[in-house]
Image (cartoon, rainbow, N blue to C red):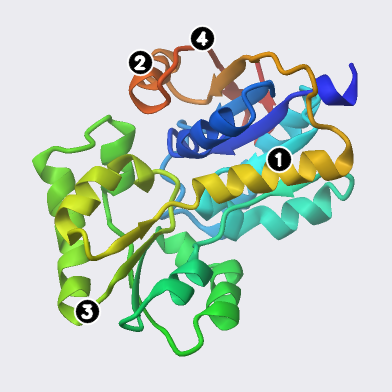
Amino acid sequence: MSPHNRPIGVFDSGVGGLSVLCAMRQLMPEETVLYFADQGHVPYGPRSLEQVRGFSEAIARFLLDQDAKLIVVACNTASAAALHFLRDRFPDVSFVGMEPAVKPAAEHTQSGLVGVLATPATFQGALYASVLERFANGVQVLQHTCPGLVGQIESGNLDDGETRAILEDALHPMLKRGIDTVVLGCTHYPFVIPLIEAIVGESVRVIDPAPAVAKQAQRMLVASGMKNLTGESARVHFYTSGDADSLASMLPKLLGETGSVDPVTWLDDHRVEL
């Protein structure tokens, strides 16, 4: 297969990475994409970094077996736990990862107070610590893990009372402290941006990193000479380690398009097979 026509691999613990995929589809509709949702192990946030690293390596191997030309780790937790590991393990493969958008938040804030919503594993990772060290000088960062929010989004509960209560518990103390910017440090969270904006009001900026990640993926494809040049819209192939019908039912709501989903069986040694 021509390098231009090879697919892009994208993976997340579940449906969160669809927020990144949506931005990629808007920017690069001509690129074929393989999307892997590891719903058999969602959520990643409470898991150990070692566990997430093992899942990430297995998924990367699966996508590379399908001839992926680039892999987007569309999961903040997996990026925190495994991005550097994956680059070391697969030195000939280009990876695009997620990191909390602290830099644009620090540049934007007028109050000097920024809120970050992310999972425990993201906050514990060296990647997040590095981002704070590099970009948060002179800015106070308030953090919250939003327990239960990923599960609510995985279930399609984007605006019910329980989801609102989780977000209010996270955001109200931050608002009282005077934040004027909220960073979404989990790819699931952009799906509840309308609810977040309703809670924080118009004076607080909400930063979704998905468009920047899509642009970075496009830049890497252009730089490597692997960008698809056909100009024709391509397909997305979906895989899940969880319930295929459940993921398929979520696609119109979260992605705005439909698609067939192939189930993947996880083996005890973390290898995968169809």
Three-letter amino acid code at disc 2?
Ser
Mark 1 residue element: helix
Q: Residue at x 72, y 59 (%)?
A: 84
96 versus 19 height, above or below: below
Looking at the image, do the residues carrying marks 3 and 1 touch, with CB atoms under 8 Å apart? no
Residue 154 x, y percent position in the rendering: 33, 34
**Percent position (x, y) of residue 40?**
47, 31
Asked if residue 262 shows in the view, the reply is: yes
The kind of residue tagged 1 is Gln
Q: In this figure, which residue is indicated by the disc labeled 2? A: 249
Question: Would residue 120 appear left or right of 27 to someone viewing this image?
Answer: left
N-terminal-most mark, 3 or 1: 3
The first of marks 2 and 3 along the sequence is 3
The spot of residue 200 in percent (x, y) is 19, 61
Image quadrant where residue 57 sits: top right
Front tag of 2 and 3: 3
Cα distance in 3D space between marks 4 and 1:
25 Å
Nearer to the camera, 269 or 215:
215
